[in-house]
Amino acid sequence: MSPFEFITVFVSLIVGFTLAHILRAVSDLYEIRERVQTYWLNSLWVATVIMWSIFTWWGLWMLSIELTEWTYAQYWILVINVSSIYFFTTLVLPKATDKGEINLEKHYYSVHKAFFSVVAFSLFSSAIVNYSLFGQPLIGPMTIMPCIVGCAAIVGVFTNSKSYHKGIGIFMFIMFIAFQLTDVTVIKYVQ
C-alpha cells in the first residue's frame, strides 16, 4: 500500500460521509416537501457544497503525484480541512422533523454565523493545504484566492444583509463551477 492510499482511505471516508449526509438531508426534506418552504439561496448552497465535496475528492489525486512521503502534520492539515467541509455541510439543511413547517430561509439565517465561520476556516485551511501539500507558492493564486474568499466568508458571519448573502452565494457557486471547468487533472492507470 502506498502512502497516498493509506492517507486517502480515511480522508475519502470523511468526504464520503459528507456527500452521504447532504444527499440524505435533501432526500429527507423531499419526502416531507409539502411542509418545506424552499429558499433558492439555500438550494444554491446545497449544490455548492456538493460540488465542493466532489471537487475536494477529485483534487486528492494530485497528492498521489505530488507527495511520496507524508508527515503526521501534513496528514492532520488534510484531515482538518476535509472535516471542516463536513461540518459546514451539516449546517446547510435542517433535520427533517415529524411535525411543523420547515422554512429554509429562516434556517439559513439562523445558522449563517456558524456556517460562514466554518466555510472561512475551510478556505483558510485550503490555502495551507495548497501550500504545504500541493507545493503551491506561498504568494500565488491557489493560496491567495482561498484567503480572499475566506475573508468574504468572514463578512458573511457578521452581516445579516440579504443582498450580501445572495451575492456571496452566487459567487461561491460560480467559483466552484469555474474551478471544475478549469481543472486539467487526468487520472491514468499505470501498470
Image: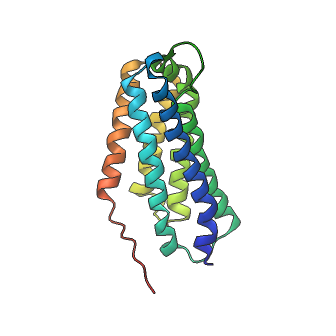
- Which residue is most to the front? 31
- Which residue is most to the bottom? 191
- Which residue is most to the right? 72
44 sits left or right of 53 in the view: left
Q: Nearer the viewer, residue 49 or 161?
A: 49
Q: Nearer the viewer, residue 157 or 53?
A: 53
Q: Is residue 139 visible?
A: yes
**Vertical placement of residue 91 versus 4, above or below:** above
- Name the residue: 44% across, 57% down: 139
Q: Is residue 85 visible?
A: no
**Vertical placement of residue 57 versus 162, above or below:** below
Q: Nearer the viewer, residue 63 or 149?
A: 63
The colour scheme used to paint the residues is rainbow
- Name the residue: 55% across, 73% down: 67
180 sits left or right of 146 in the view: left
Q: Give how far across and how far down residue 88 sits, in percent.
A: 55, 38
Quadrant for the N terminus in the image: bottom right
**Vertical placement of residue 153 versus 73, above or below:** above
- Name the residue: 46% across, 68% down: 62
- Which residue is most to the top? 100
Q: Give how far across and how far down residue 123 sits, in percent.
A: 50, 46
Q: Nearer the viewer, residue 135 or 61?
A: 61
